Image (cartoon, coloured by chain):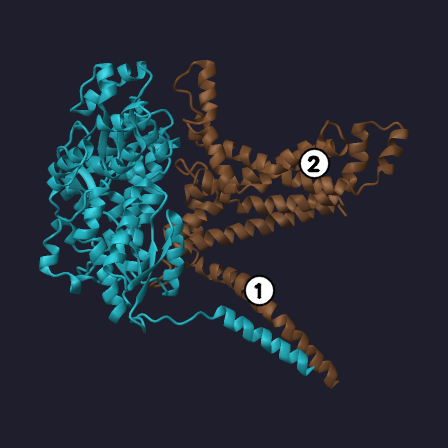
Chain colours: A cyan, B brown
Amino acid sequence: MRKLVLVAALLLTAMTMAFAGPSKDTSGATSGAVTLTVYHQIDLASPQYEYWPVTLAAFAEKYPDIKLDFEYVSGEQFHDKFQAMAATGDIPDIFTTYVGSRSSYILDRGLVKDLRPYLTDSFKANYTPAIWGPQGPNGEIYIISPNMAVCTVVYVNTKLQKELGLTTPKTLDEMIAQVPAIRAAGYTPLMFANKGVWQAQSLLLSMLVDRMGGTAWFDKARAGTAKFTDKPFVDALAVIKRMVDTQLFPAGVNQLEGPEGWGDFVQGKSVYLLDAGWRVGALKGAAAPADYAQYEAIAFPEVPGEVVHGSSAATLGEALAMNAKLTGAKADAAWKFLSFIYGQEGLDILMKYGTVPTYKLDYSKYDLDSLNRQYIQLTNSQTMGYVIDAVMDGEGVNNLLNPGIQAVMMGSKTPAQLAAEYEAWVAANDSNRKK
Amino acid sequence: MKYQLSRKISHYCFILPAFLIFISVMIFPVFFSFVLGFTQWKGYGEMRFVGFDNYIRMFQDPVFHIALRNNILIVLISVFGQIPLGMLLAYMLHRKMVKKSNVFEVLIFLPITISSVIIAQLWNRMFSPVGILPALVRTITGNKDYIITIVENKDLAIIPIMFVLLWQHTSLYMVIFLANLQRIPNSFIEAAQLEGAGEGTIFLKIIMPILGYVIFINSILAIAGSFKSFDLIYSMSGGGPAHYTEVIAVYMYNTTFVHQNYGYGSALSIIIIGFIVLSLLLTRGVSKIFKVE
């Protein structure tokens, strides 16, 4: 009997030990070296992140005593796992963070360190001022965004344009007028892919809403002094429907995955491509050098009834942030890491790999290709509207607005219907209306 | 007496670890979800009790209606598609109605061994506007703009997914039927043949009654699996376009973990459990009517 009880007690002890985790030290290391855990949302296999191993090698050379223990997860799985970690309050030392609702599960819990004590005026002066706007309710700054995510750019295959005898359209009407000639030649006029659901909202509607109403109108709609049933929003949705009806987009635009869309553009199957600014790197990696050299980047053409001309939509690009609990040597090491990868040395590497950073660099020193130069000139000359999913609550955007745009595109909902449904949801639920 | 008591205690000690695990990973999450279903909660911060609001919202929610309809269609294709087809294939292979039955057996069984995510990618490549099937039709018909349009139809968009589910899961039922068919002594069938029974009579009068309980078990598996169906649909369409291929499990996942609406998501998960339990009770009831032993 005693043996049985002993075995049972041992089993229980083993279980208790298995379920118990080790306690964490957040203040620093006992020896000279400091190890930081990093939870990073990137896909290392993507050509977009070729710069990252180079950046890490440069950091390791400068700071050999700081060791980094990475976990890379991309896509929705990143958020799934991170939400579970956040629920337990046990999160890594450094992690990818978005400014806005996408990272609310860590931001609202106070798990992210406010970087303001580290940000001296001389440090901040090196960057585009736009990145230092408040990121939290009390003016907190959580991330040093390395780049602005410009969401609407039209890429042009000038070789196909010449072949078809077309010129770059200045207005949407001119672009639509080119559709019969392009289609007759067997090409797609404006390549766009929206199976991911978010693209029509982030890459198109956000820009169109800015063109139709401007940021001042959007601020009012967020606050509730204007409504999403107002003309600017409904008209912006109607423009998308018109683009579908006039066959600007490829057939089955809502069945196409992003890479299928820009992949077809690279293969010379479409004259124009509607995509984001961050696609430049992927185009460079995928297209033949001669084809890439003739691509051009232009603003979305003028839309009938627009009140803001030539604008795009942009938000701060995501970045690594620091665990709020870090203190002592670990916090110092984390700041060294962040200020390196998002400082002159790190962003110089990023620039060499074709992404324009928020750090003020002398562009003339870089051997930039023509598309990158055009892109820089274009975005410097544009005003930027809000990206809707960066400022409005996720459930309303992802569950109602994004699928609703698809429904409008496929003709099962009218722009006015969708606008009314979204306004009703925002009025009842969105945190912007409750401030 | 003392020995009996200490024996009892020792038994409980051995049961305790398994019982604790069962409580913590099964009973507690279901109970917690049930409670959460009456709240509004973002997964952190204030948890607000809202009574039956989440359930009332569910029955007014057009997306839930689409998801429920799609789940019912998937149950139907599972029970009246996968099971009969699996049984037919198993019977054909067992009775050697095709040559090289071993090869066919492997080919039919292959889909169930492949990850649903890979299957989703494979069929997406087939159905996509730049995929193999539309390209083939374009070549044959000369229609340059041909795409599979039912994917963009609110009522029909679920059909390609149902087809893939049928293709993927039929093999599982086929293997279960085949294993049970192999247990039927050949002498039964030979005796029937000597009496002049044809294939149809053998199938209906001998095979079907013997496989009755297997059909019942397979129906339970099919119904429970259909209400839980997630991986293939999430990977293939994510519920889109415009929620047309939504099922309750995908909607529950997105609501809870992507939109952080734990209250409504938990109410949806309770409904899934409710439907599974209800379907199983119905199946049991039907099996009793037909006296399946």
Total numbered badges shown on the rendered structure? 2
Label 2, on which residue?
B87
Q: As rendered, which of A356 and A166 lies closer to the eye?
A: A356
Q: Is residue A95 left or right of residue B174?
A: left
Query: Picture coordinates of residue A242 (x, y %)?
Result: 27, 26
The spot of residue A34 in percent (x, y) is: 30, 67
- Please determine if labels 2 and 1 lie on a single subunit: yes
Q: Between disc 2 and disc 1, whose residue precedes?
A: 1
Find residue B26 and report its horizontal and vertical position in percent: 55, 61
Mark 1 is surrounded, within 10 Å at the Cα level, by few (under 14), some (14 to 19) or many (20 or more) other residues, namely few
Q: Name the quadrant containing residue A63.
A: bottom left
Residue B65's x, y, as percent? Answer: 46, 41
Quick check: B24 left or right of B46? right
> Contact, CB < 8 Å: mark 2 with mark 1?
no
Asked if A107 appears above or below B293 in the picture, the reply is: below
Quarter location, residue B219: top right
Task: State the residue lying farthest toward the bottom.
Answer: B2
Choose between B9 and A246: the one closer to the eye: B9
Residue type at the position of mark 2:
Met
The residue lying at 21 percent from left, 62 percent from top is A114
**Chain of the residue under the numbered disc 2 shown in the image:** B
What's the residue at 18%, 19% (across, down)?
Answer: A167
The residue beneath circle 1 is: B22
Q: Picture quarter containing residue B72?
A: top right
Chain letter behind tag 1 = B
Q: Nearer the viewer, residue B284 or A367?
A: A367
Q: How dense is the environment of label 2, judged by Cα within 10 Å: few (below 14), some, or many (20 and up)?
A: many
Question: Which secondary structure, mark 1?
Answer: helix
Image quarter (top left, top right, bottom left or bottom right) of the N terminus of chain A:
bottom right
Nearest the eye: A229 or A303: A303
